[in-house]
Amino acid sequence: MINKIIAVLFFVLLYFTQAKEVLVVAPGLGGHIRPNFDLVKKLSTRGHQVTLLTESLALRYINTTGVNIKELILTDTSSGALERELINDSNLNSHVANITNLMDGIIHFFSNRSEMELSFYKKISELMQKQKYDLMMVDFSAFTVRPLIFPNNTPCAISWGTYIASTDVPDINVVALTNPLNSGIFNTFFGRIHNILRSVTFTFSIAKYVLGLFSRINQDVTIPETFRSLANVANFNAATDRCMSIIAVPPAMNPERYRNYQHRFVGTFMDLSEVTKPQQVEHWIEHWLTSHKSVIFAALGTTTFLSEERMKSFLLGLDYFLTRESNKNASVFLALSHQNYVLFQQVSLQMKNLNKLIVSDRIKVVSDFVPQRAILQHESVKVFISHGGTGSVMESLLYGKPILNMPYHFDHHYTSIKVQELNAGLSLFSWEPTFVDLFIEREHVKYVFTAEDVSEKLSLLLHDNKFTKGAKSLSREIMYGGGAERAVYEMEYLMDMGNLDYQRPLYMDYPFYSRYYLDFILVVVVIMYLSFKMINVLF
């Protein structure tokens, strides 16, 4: 008995002596804070002392009860901070809803978040004067804080929980976020030229944004000189080069990202030990789902604003789908944000032929928050209708549910295309670029779909088993990644080693001309030229 007690005490002591100081930096937007908070919970259960720096807005999406966080720090603790952030978030979504192309939307998003980045920079500077951290984990969207690893050479991990169509450096061999091409078009000469133009434009726009922020930081005298002087492009590139990237998508969704020695695929940031456990939902939700055997679950995001035209096509499409004889056992559970719910009520009153359907037991429409993960886990749910946000798509695929995507903005279009290519779902968005698109970016966000599109594609997803097989195949790949457990293991390994320099391939330190064989090509060309001249002289 005494030996057992000693053994337990030994492991408890070992557990806590390995505890590290970890600083986690994440925006308050739901799609960013939720996946990062999954990692925070796992880090804390491993005994690490986690300081979470975020915005007041985050408190709408996370519950810290029972989570052993050392300190939760908000960028703005003044009176009315949450209300201001909510208004800013609402204005951002309203603006994006009226933007005509992906490029403008993305640039406006980052510009809108510049105050957040400046606040992060100031807060981290203050914290690092008081505390030495063993690791700084930063959400990918917080660009400018990366140079702050240098005063203490803090190991750094960049969390990619939502944004998959990206590389850490410009790469014309990767489909640009603002260029939603399928693989077939991308591999053509036209597609390559189109992608180069979009990649260059996007890179210059982001560079302009980052340089502008660095300029503001350099002029802000409230930031100590030691930290203020770090804000420059050279340090940004050097920091990015030193950071490990923790990526929460399967390689199949974006295979070109996994060539870099810094990348770690973990599939999802969720704790996989919790995935297979039955999750609790409210009694009325459980009762409704259990009493319906083929449920189409639709959740279009908290920040997606549907137009009246799309809402009409969507509802009429659901009507067509449910009235098909082959779908007589199907039902729809529709979760809408407040603004979309108001629009739903207005449109449903105009479309009198929908009234009977709306009040029937085969469709349930709610405007309250619903536990999306728990509903997707339910065996009655067969198909998921999504806006194409990476977090929602990964949750659906994790539970092996095929998806009908209605992409809205940002990474949604790209994600929708990849899901369709992998036979894990279908998309209401399609685009065939023309020569004009080389010079003028079309209104990708204003694409049109019909009620017939909705009905036909939902029927295919429900009855064609290849889509369920595709989703389950990706589910296995996500599970294989290891989830939060693997992510934390990789970060602990990074903390122990200090950096990843020992894994850096030799070719990455070659001069540009050597890396791309330009010196070799030049020698070959010169030899061929001299040989040709010699042949002409001799003969």
Image: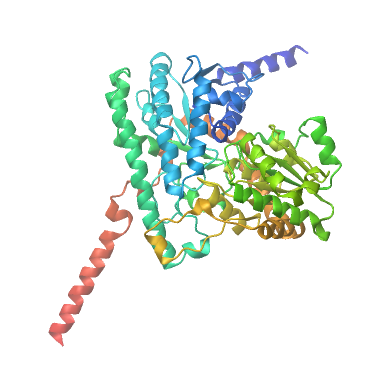
In the figure, residue 174 lies in which quadrant? bottom left
Query: Residue 373 placed where, x, y %?
Result: 70, 37
Task: Determine the residue positioned at 38% across, 15% down.
Answer: 129
Q: Residue furthest right?
A: 291
Q: Nearer the viewer, residue 366 or 35?
A: 366
Q: Is residue 448 above or below residue 98?
A: below
Q: Is residue 101 left or right of residue 39?
A: left
Q: Is residue 122 above or below residue 316?
A: above
Residue at the image point whose x is 45% and y is 44% from the top: 105
102 shown above or below 497:
below
- Judge left or right: residue 66 versus residue 530: right
Inspect this view and state whether residue 230 appears.
no
372 with respect to 18 (left or right): right
Question: Hey, which quadrant is residue 15 in on the image?
Answer: top right
Q: Is residue 97 visible?
A: yes
View extreme (top): residue: 2
Q: Nearer the viewer, residue 532 or 360?
A: 360
Question: Who's the residue at 24% across and 69% down the image?
Answer: 525
Q: Position of residue 180 (x, y in %)?
A: 49, 55
Who is closer to the viewer here, 518 or 337? 337
Quadrant holding the N terminus = top right
Q: Position of residue 169 (x, y in %)?
A: 39, 46
Does 444 appear above or below 110? below
Give x and y (percent) for residue 259.
47, 50
Seen as rendered, the residue at the extreme left is 537
